[in-house]
Image (cartoon, rainbow, N blue to C red):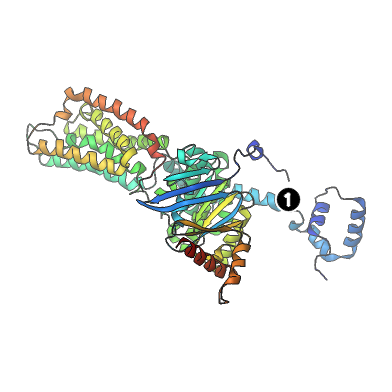
Amino acid sequence: MSTECVSARVLARYGSGQDLPPETVWVLEAHLERCPSCRQRLGGPAADPGVLALVESVRSAVEPRLGPGHGLWWGWRHRLRRGMARWSTPAALPWLATAVFVPLAAMTLDLTSAGISGEDGVPLVLLVAPVIPALAVAAAWNRWTDRAYELVSVTARAGLSLLLRRTLAALLVILPPLAGAGAVVGASPSLWLLPGLALTIAVLALGAVIGVGRATGVLAGVWILAVILPALVRVWPPVALEPGSAPVWAAVIVVGGGLLLRFRDGYQQNNLS
Amino acid sequence: MIQAISSDDLAPSTYAWHVRAENLAVRAGRRLAVAGVDLSFTTGVYGVLGPNGAGKTTLLRALATVRQPAAGRLDLLGAPMHERGGLPEVRRQLGYLPQTFGYYRWYTVREFVEYLAWLKAVPGQDLAAEVQRAIDLVGLSGHADHRLRTLSGGMVRRAGLAQAIVGDPALLVLDEPTAGLDPQSRAEIRELLSGLGRTNCVVMATHLVEDVADDSTEIVILDDGHLAFRGTPAQVAAAAAEAAPGNGSELERGYAVLLERSRLVTR
């Protein structure tokens, strides 16, 4: 003999007060009077699957808010981390810290050795400043630095808008310390901000084709060979940083922006890996 | 209990097949790892079997929109992938678990799944509940707020599965979902997947025949980038009759026979 004399479904419908044929109700009630185990089942939570589903849905809504007893501090930390993950990849934080360190190191060098490039020379901070924003952005969409890149690159948000969001966040983090270091050694933002933005956009546009990591490497290499080294060994002065070259940088921004829009699919469909 | 049904649930799908491939070719690096494959998947669990290097992972990477088809047609959820059409819409409905995936070691399971749920554009108001549901389904409820680096390999695999199923995607692409799991967890995951297969399309690659349950809808055997066999588990088991009786299950012996047969034909 089965341990279940009445099917769970019938019991559930009776328990939840749903329509049952009157003859079924009579038989059921007559049986319940004599059968303690079925009375037990009727009173138990499993009698109504709807109740179980409701309890489950309430739990899945409430549980994430509670956490396993970590309280206020845990909730605060969780919200902070969630907010940060929306504006930058979690992998970018060490990278950003390194990028902040570079202008500070250059500033220290400038202060201690009274300018590597001599009395009349340009400060080192000014020479490196235009590549720093591009360096900070390099980790925003990068297969080499982001461990979860394969997962992230096939999500619905992957694409130009996510990249620009992360770029903006990286720029907001990197520009204040850069400006501060520049102010200490007398490198005005009016000299490096425009080239910096132009290089950043150039990195993003080139990155759509060859990947942001490689694009940063290429452009930073070109900048070091064409501007920083010649200025340090005094082959030629850093023409690129003179106010006169501003129209060229503006043109780079416009062209780079156009190319970025043209090749934006590269950030969605990444066949580089 | 009142069931909330949104208009999205009732909207008719505009495609006949979740996955439709015709003469599909996919590259892995410069090599053509998959060539001339025809597939048509709808709801159900589809097992992709094959020896090492048969092109299973490459095929799944194409189904997960990681790689573009090199030739042929590939329609995912009605969008033509060979023409780069509708990528974000497809990805909204896609869950992908790669063979190996990187993760942030200092993240908790919940933070990890929530990060990917946000990237997958799961609606904001149900994000937390949806994440909890996914974590419960893979059986990690007790570890939801543990850091990933403190978890065992099998649990990390489950966390990966949770990020794939979060948001209830119509198309689930899982590359060796049960790798590194103990036998009991394996059975649980199989049960979970066959439950999901009732309403979703679950494509799962494995090199273990026993992972493909008897109740899977179709078994696809790949060999050297080509389709060696497509059919039901019953057909695979029936092929075992030709094999010399030996150890191993019927499915395993049937798989060996079918693989051998296709090699004879191509030679």
Q: Please name the residue shown 55% across and 59% down the image.
A: B142
- Determine the image quadrant of residue A116: top left
Count of numbered circles in the view = 1
Front residue of this view, candidates B198 and B104: B198
Q: Is residue A62 left or right of residue B173?
A: right
Q: Provide residue A53's location: percent of width, then percent of height.
A: 69, 51
| Chain under disc 1 | A
Q: Quadrant of the C terminus of chain B?
A: bottom left
Residue drawn at (62%, 67%) of the image = B238
Classify 10 Å Cα crowding around label 1: few (below 14), some (14-19), many (20 and above).
Answer: some
- Under circle 1, the secondary element is helix
Q: Quadrant of residue A268?
A: top left
Q: Which residue is mark 1?
A: A50
Would residue A87 be found to the left or right of residue A224 on screen? Answer: right
Question: B253 above or below B53?
Answer: below
Q: Amino acid at mark 1?
A: Gly
**Quick one: A269 or A201, which is closer to the camera?**
A269
Residue A145 appears at what percent x and percent y?
33, 49
Q: Is residue B217 visible?
A: yes
Indicate the position of residue A125 as horizontal and vertical percent values: 18, 36
Residue B152 visible, this orientation: no
State whether residue B264 is above or below residue B85: below
Q: Is residue A157 above or below residue A15?
A: above
